[in-house]
Amino acid sequence: MLVREVMSNEAITVQLGTPVKSALAVLASERITSLPVVSPSGKLRGIVSEADLIRDGVSMDARLHEIPRENVLVERHQYVDDVMTTHVLTVGPDSDLAEAVELMTSTGVKSVPVVAANGKVLGVVSRSDVVHMLARADHDLERDVDAALVSVGLRDWLVEVNDGTVELVAPARGVDDRGLARVVAGTVPGVVQVHIISTG
């Protein structure tokens, strides 16, 4: 399965020079955990996470100290440029989704920008995108696998899905199409495994 088949196609980004407060508002309203930072032309320049944006945003509470501390002004970062990570893990739209999942699970990042060859951000693939895909209902998968098979001329195959595992039964004259059927069924988002049941 390819990243472009699962990713969020509308990348929510902020531009260089965006105030930290504005970026926080975007995270809160969109219920996301990080934002790609882009140039005016849409090219990726960095990424800011919740942790980056809140790091110096909360002051010590003076009520918790017997001797109040002097009112020292803490210099706070004003713009995303000051707190963003410039070394960004990315994937392309035609990257294997399994590689993107490995990248997220091995590094602990929750989402990865999807970037075109020219450096422009096309979207984002996140852990939650993968969770939603894997949680798709079996009847939806069955319908989509059947439609995918029909689209390549494999009309008479029987499809059954249980817990994301697809079982295909070939028509008598479809034995030679088993490889194609397996590949096509496996491209449907949410399919975990594909088994072909022998009728003979």
Image: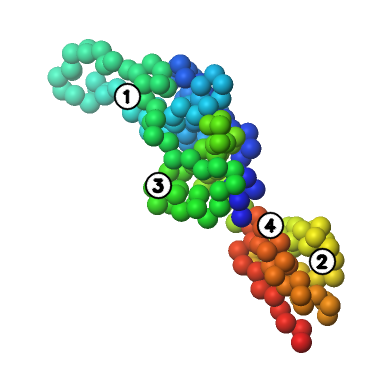
Query: Which residue lies at the image location 44% right of the left edge and 29% below the top edge?
Result: 46
For disc 3, the marked residue is 108
Whichever of labels 2 and 1 marks the residue nearer the N terminus, that label is 1
Asked whether the beta carbons under mark 1 and mark 4 sit within 8 Å of each other, the answer is no
Mark 1 Cα-neighbour bin, 10 Å: few <14, some 14–19, many ≥20: few
The type of residue carrying mark 2 is Leu
Mark number displayed over residue 154: 2
The label nearer to you, 4 versus 2, is 2
Dot 4: element = loop
The structure's colour scheme is rainbow
C-alpha span from label 1 to label 4: 44 Å
C-alpha span from label 3 to label 1: 22 Å
The type of residue carrying mark 4 is Val
The label nearer to you, 4 versus 3, is 4
Q: Classify 151 as above or below 120.
A: below
Mark 2 Cα-neighbour bin, 10 Å: few <14, some 14–19, many ≥20: many
Q: Is residue 17 left or right of residue 65?
A: right
C-alpha span from label 2 to label 1: 59 Å
Q: Nearer the viewer, residue 45 or 74?
A: 45
Whichever of labels 4 and 3 marks the residue nearer the N terminus, that label is 3
Q: Quadrant of the N terminus?
A: bottom right
Q: Quadrant of residue 20?
A: top left
Dot 3: element = loop
Dot 2: element = loop
Asked whether the beta carbons under mark 2 and mark 3 sit within 8 Å of each other, the answer is no
The label nearer to you, 1 versus 4, is 4
Whichever of labels 3 and 1 marks the residue nearer the N terminus, that label is 1
